[in-house]
Amino acid sequence: MYPIRNTTMSNIELNDKKIQILEVAEKLFSEKGFEGTSIRDISKHAKINIAMVSYYFGSKERLLEALILYKTSDLKLQLENLLQENLEPVEKVNKLIEIYVNGICLNKGIYRVLHFELNTKKREKSMIAFTELKKGNLKSVERIITQGQEKGVFRKDIIIPLITPTIIGTFFHFHMNKSFFEELLDLKTEEMFNNYIKTSLTKHIQQTIKALLVYEN
């Protein structure tokens, strides 16, 4: 049985077959939904025996849980590493925003799955480990903001738990209205759209968060 509950991906061994299954599951879950995807579908697309999928993960719910951790655990490590970097407070927050935006860009499929699953609340047990991961990430964000407050750079009245939703919410509003912004901003190709996210949208989010954090002149 694949041990996933109350743990993180850092102490779980992943072989090539498990990763292949997880990648296929992400694609199918994001396209067809959790309910619309069967273990048989996953095994067929992964070209792996259905019994092997069940052996590795036990159930579709446990597979979902493993997938969420597999795709989101790296963010935790990046935030913890950022905490230790010798950067000025604003630089550190700018890098934090880049980490979040890049992470979402690389894992759009799992974020679509998460959005649906968190809204339906049908598989709350599968979300427990992810919720704990988010709490850990929030602690890292809190510490980064606190570092800036201790240096007198950031305001003391910031509602820190709302910083991350502001970053992620701005990104997803832009992405969910892709056709509108492609026309509005004359982004004719997928490459142009993605480059705009990495440059202009990221800079806009950085400016927004800086305006929230830094004392007015």
Image (cartoon, rainbow, N blue to C red):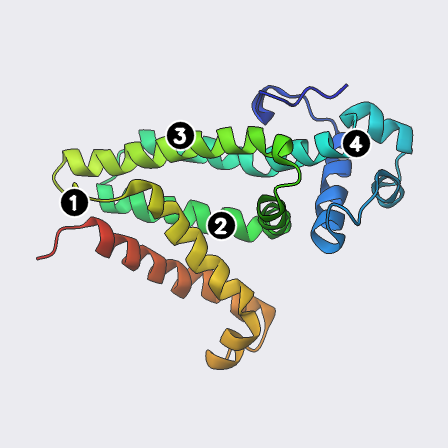
Callout 3: helix, strand or loop?
Answer: helix
Q: Residues within 10 Å of mark 2 (few under 14, many from 20)?
A: some
| Amino acid type of the residue that numbered disc 2 sits on in the rendered structure | Asn
The residue indicated by pointer 3 is 80
| Rendered image quadrant of residue 5 | top right
The residue indicated by pointer 2 is 102
If the image is split into quadrants, where does the N terminus sit?
top right
Callout 4: helix, strand or loop?
Answer: helix
* Among the two numbered marks 1 and 2 on one chain, the one whose residue lies closer to the N terminus: 2
Callout 1: helix, strand or loop?
Answer: loop
Residue 86 is situated, as x and y percent measured from the top left of the image, at 26, 34
In the image, taking residue 30 as reference, residue 163 lies left or right, namely: left
Residue 17 circle label: 4
Q: Could you tell me how far apart the alpha carbons at marks 1 and 2 are, in whole angstroms?
A: 27 Å
Q: Are marks 2 and 3 in contact (CB under 8 Å)?
A: no
Which is more foreground, mark 1 or mark 4? 1
In the image, taking residue 216 as reference, residue 129 lies left or right, namely: right
The residue drawn where x is 61% and y is 42% is 121
